[in-house]
């Protein structure tokens, strides 16, 4: 979502004559788009501001801005920590940038943080997409779930869906521009449309409409909330040939007591049943997940339930993190239950080890199979051209070929599986 926001910010800035530079020393305007999901990312943002603050001493004309979740969360405090910052704008204020930029160009110090999102047709603003193959479309922003560890509802606000016609228009433009993959984004993507008073507006129906658009492209959606995956959504994924057979479904813990403490609205058993429903429908599906090690009060036995779940569910890959206390959240206040850092990181290490193990096992399943991949990049190795691609099921596949190029769909027979990727040969 942050990368997508950055593309939109770059598009808006281009109206004012700004062009992106790879060399920050050349820049007249420096903006950091921040994430506050963990303390480490927030700390990195402040450290980057410090570097730019030093640059500004010798080049006082440069303007420095900060946006995203750290800006939304820390508001006026940012200026106390970094008084040289010219522009602070929150996650809801991106589309106000045209007026904000004019104000900082007139040497005003600006802080634009609101809890009421600016509602506008995003198609009225240019987007400078970084990737030439994959385009992101945010379809719903914010979250109503209030998981006890998560800062997102406080920084991104409550769920707000974009109108389907606006999304379809953006998709049509993307396809015309030659993109080959559309990823629909939402913190809780399967809640799409619930804030409209219209039962026909849902993620499942949006997938059906996008699937009907002409063109050679495929569609993904992230991130799913386990208990919001409906039978209708599974049917839509099945019916729509352009929709990838891939689900990212964060489980967070394999223990029902911890899930309750996290305010997740499902038990371990309910998660198991969702996974088995999806696997029964799509035998070659890839299911990935997220897990937190060392949530406040988690016992060793409860942590072991997570390791067991990853094994039993045969998850294909998981994002993992040690629990990081966040401002405003309920879990952040459970200080008497915090797990000592050494235990938390020792559990994270075991979680990562389990992840490596199941990833390799999952990749091995594809040896000998033919996957349709989309070429995303290329590298040269020992004088040979290696194409880097991604299969429908989100597996990374490398293969040798001088016949195909970035943006091509190619059938590849998998010859070798490694922990994080697959290797194969073109299947003509
Ligand atoms: S569903 Fe995801 S974004 Fe929403 S509160 Fe929970 S973890 Fe955060």
Image (tube, rainbow, N blue to C red):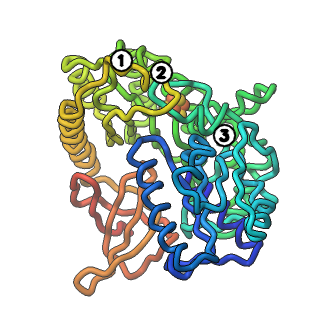
For marks 1 and 3, the one nearer the N-term is 3
For marks 3 and 2, the one nearer the N-term is 3
Query: Element at badge 1?
Result: helix
**Residue 81 drawn above or below residue 192:** below
**Residue 399 drawn above or below residue 194:** below
Q: Residue at x 34, y 61 (%)?
A: 397
Q: Quadrant of residue 152?
A: top right
| Residue labelled with disc 3 | 140
Labels 3, 2: front one: 2
Q: Residue at x 49, y 43 (%)?
A: 36
CA separation in Å, label 3 and label 2: 24 Å
- Whole-percent x, y for residue 293 in the image: 29, 31
Quarter occupied by the C terminus? bottom left
Are the two marked residues, 1 and 3, in contact with CB atoms closer than 8 angstroms? no
| Residue 330 disc label | 2
- Label 2: few (<14), some or many (≥20) within 10 Å? some
- Whole-percent x, y for residue 172 in the image: 73, 59
**Residue 335 drawn above or below residue 135:** above
| Of 119 and 372, the residue lying toward us | 119
- Whole-percent x, y for residue 199 in the image: 76, 25
CA separation in Å, label 2 and label 1: 14 Å
Q: Residue at x 44, y 24 (%)?
A: 274
Are the two marked residues, 2 and 1, in contact with CB atoms closer than 8 angstroms? no
Q: Is residue 242 visible?
A: no
Q: Is residue 358 left or right of residue 328?
A: left
Query: Element at badge 2?
Result: loop
For marks 2 and 1, the one nearer the N-term is 1
| Residue labelled with disc 1 | 258
Q: Is residue 80 left or right of residue 117?
A: left
| Residue 329 disc label | none
- Label 3: few (<14), some or many (≥20) within 10 Å? many
- Whole-percent x, y for residue 361 in the image: 21, 43
């Amino acid at each position: 979502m942050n990368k997508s926001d950055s593309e939109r910010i770059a598009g808006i800035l281009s109206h004012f004559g700004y062009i992106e530079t790879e060399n920050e020393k050349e820049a007249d305007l420096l903006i950091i788009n921040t994430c506050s999901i963990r303390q480490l990312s927030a700390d990195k943002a402040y450290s980057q501001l410090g570097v730019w603050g030093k640059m500004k001493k010798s080049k006082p004309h440069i303007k420095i801005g900060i946006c995203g979740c750290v800006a939304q969360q820390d508001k006026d405090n940012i200026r106390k920590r970094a008084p040289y910052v010219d522009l602070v704008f929150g996650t809801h204020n991106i589309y106000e940038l045209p007026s904000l930029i004019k104000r900082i160009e007139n040497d005003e110090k600006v802080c634009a943080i609101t809890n009421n999102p600016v509602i506008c047709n995003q198609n009225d603003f240019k987007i400078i997409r970084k990737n030439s193959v994959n385009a992101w479309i945010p379809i719903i922003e914010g979250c109503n779930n209030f998981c006890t560890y998560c800062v997102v509802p406080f920084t991104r606000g409550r769920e707000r869906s974009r109108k389907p016609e606006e999304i379809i228009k953006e998709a049509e433009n993307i396809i015309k521009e030659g993109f080959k993959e559309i990823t629909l984004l939402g913190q809780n993507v399967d809640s799409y449309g619930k804030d409209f008073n219209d039962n026909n507006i849902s993620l499942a129906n949006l997938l059906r409409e996008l699937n009907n658009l002409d063109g050679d492209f495929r569609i993904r959606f992230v991130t799913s909330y386990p208990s919001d995956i409906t039978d209708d959504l599974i049917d839509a994924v099945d019916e729509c040939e352009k929709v990838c057979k891939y689900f990212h479904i964060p489980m967070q813990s394999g223990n029902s007591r911890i899930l309750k403490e996290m305010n997740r609205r499902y038990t371990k058993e309910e998660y198991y049943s969702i996974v088995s429903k999806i696997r029964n429908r799509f035998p070659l599906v890839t299911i990935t997940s997220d897990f937190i090690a060392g949530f406040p009060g988690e016992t060793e036995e409860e942590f072991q339930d997570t390791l067991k779940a990853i094994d039993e569910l045969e998850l294909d890959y998981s994002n993992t993190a040690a629990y990081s206390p966040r401002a405003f959240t309920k879990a952040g206040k459970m200080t008497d239950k915090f797990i000592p850092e050494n235990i938390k990181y020792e559990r994270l290490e075991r979680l990562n080890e389990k992840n490596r193990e199941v990833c390799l096992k999952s990749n091995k399943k594809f040896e000998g199979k033919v996957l349709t991949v989309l070429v995303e990049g290329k590298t040269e190795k020992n004088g040979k051209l290696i194409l880097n691609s991604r299969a429908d099921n989100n597996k990374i596949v490398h293969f040798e070929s001088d016949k195909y190029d970035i943006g091509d769909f190619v059938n590849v027979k998998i010859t070798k599986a490694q922990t994080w990727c697959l290797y194969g040969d073109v299947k003509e």
